[in-house]
Amino acid sequence: MNTNSTASPNPRNRSGNTPEIDPDIRVAFILSPRFTIIAFASFVDCLRHAADEADQSRQIYCSWSVVAPNLEPIEASCGIQVIPQQTFPDPTIFDYIVIVGGLLPVCLEVPEVTYDYLRAARACNVSVVGLCTGSFILAKAGLLDGRKCAVHFEHRQQLVDLFPGVIPVTDRVYFNDRGIITCPGGTAPLDLAFTLIEEHCGKARAVKGITSLLVDKHRAVHHMPHRPYDSLTACGDWRVEQSVALMQRNISKPFGIDVLAHRLGTSARELNRAFEKHAGDGPATIWRKIRLAHGHWLLLNSARAVTQIALECGFADTSHFSRWFKTTYGEGPKIFREHRRRI
């Protein structure tokens, strides 16, 4: 398995007619020394099949790239070498940065610049993912202190001994703790990839990603939220937790933040402070993003008219919905849907 393109985070196979649209999900892979190839291959091949029609492997709806401090080959635990496609670019061009772990303790011997890159990604609110013992690398970077981490039961005690500040979870296929996602490896990355593809590209693309690999179905034994901002319902601040729960139950009929605060028995000022601390945005902005994400899902997974979707998402009219949708997703809802139905 050799990859040798260095030009772009979204290389495309130009054979055939490739629609010029931005991918809905962009993923960077960082491979640790002696990484486990099944964890990497499970995730990336699910992306590959979901990214295009048939088996053409063009990076249309999903894009991915192997990034590293340099372009030297990286050897997997099985002896196969992979050549990175580019040196570390701006992490904000990706939706997820996935660190693939491998044999312990050698996989922890990634260069210090890699740890810095992971920290920089989180500082920019880019989600990071640890596959297999990639969670150990995230822990060594200081990103898992006080957070839950999905880990293989055979590595639980080792994780606790090395990083006592991490909370191990052994009964989940993967776990998302406030934008840091961990997965114990093996074939579990298929299930994680399915969930992320479904969230960004729609269920049809996610199903294609696993059925093309002759996998019967997505394993649903996990706590990975399918709804954006579900992690805020467990952030530790009751005002934010209860607010987000109310927002999710009132997508089609939002009400004022003063009313929301009153229902919770707090003030709008205190509620705004709590949201800024835990979400980085005010409650009104978070509520709008939740409603827009629901509209995004409906555009991908239903035949409802844009006008109907706008009303269902609590917008006064189609133009209001379309304006905010374009601001958030880069194109209006009608064009967004047309592009994804073109092929």
Image: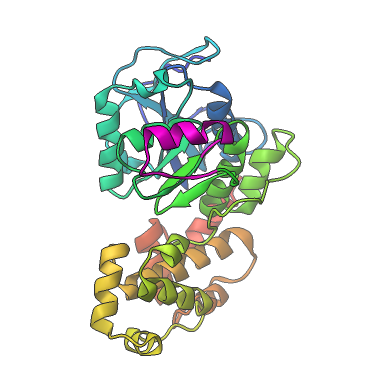
Q: Quadrant of residue 229?
A: bottom left
Q: How many marks?
A: 0
On the question of residue 95 being in view, the answer is yes
- Residue 117 in percent (x, y) is at 27, 34
On the question of residue 28 being in view, the answer is no
Q: Residue at x 60, y 46 (%)?
A: 171
Residue 211 sits above or below residue 125 on the image: above
Residue 91 sits above or below residue 83 on the image: below
Determine the residue located farthest toward the top in the rendered image: 79
- Answer whether residue 158 is magenta in the image: yes
The magenta segment is 151-169
Q: In this orientation, which residue lies closer to the viewer: 293 or 155? A: 155
- Residue 104 in percent (x, y) is at 45, 21
Check the image and tell me how it is coloured.
Answer: rainbow
Residue 41 sits above or below residue 231 on the image: above
- Residue 2 in percent (x, y) is at 49, 14
- Answer whether residue 290 is magenta in the image: no
Q: In this orientation, which residue lies closer to the viewer: 193 or 118? A: 118
- Quadrant containing the C terminus is top right
- Residue 187 in percent (x, y) is at 63, 33
Q: Quadrant of residue 330?
A: bottom left
Q: In this orientation, which residue lies closer to the viewer: 22 or 50? A: 50
Q: Residue at x 54, y 50 (%)?
A: 201
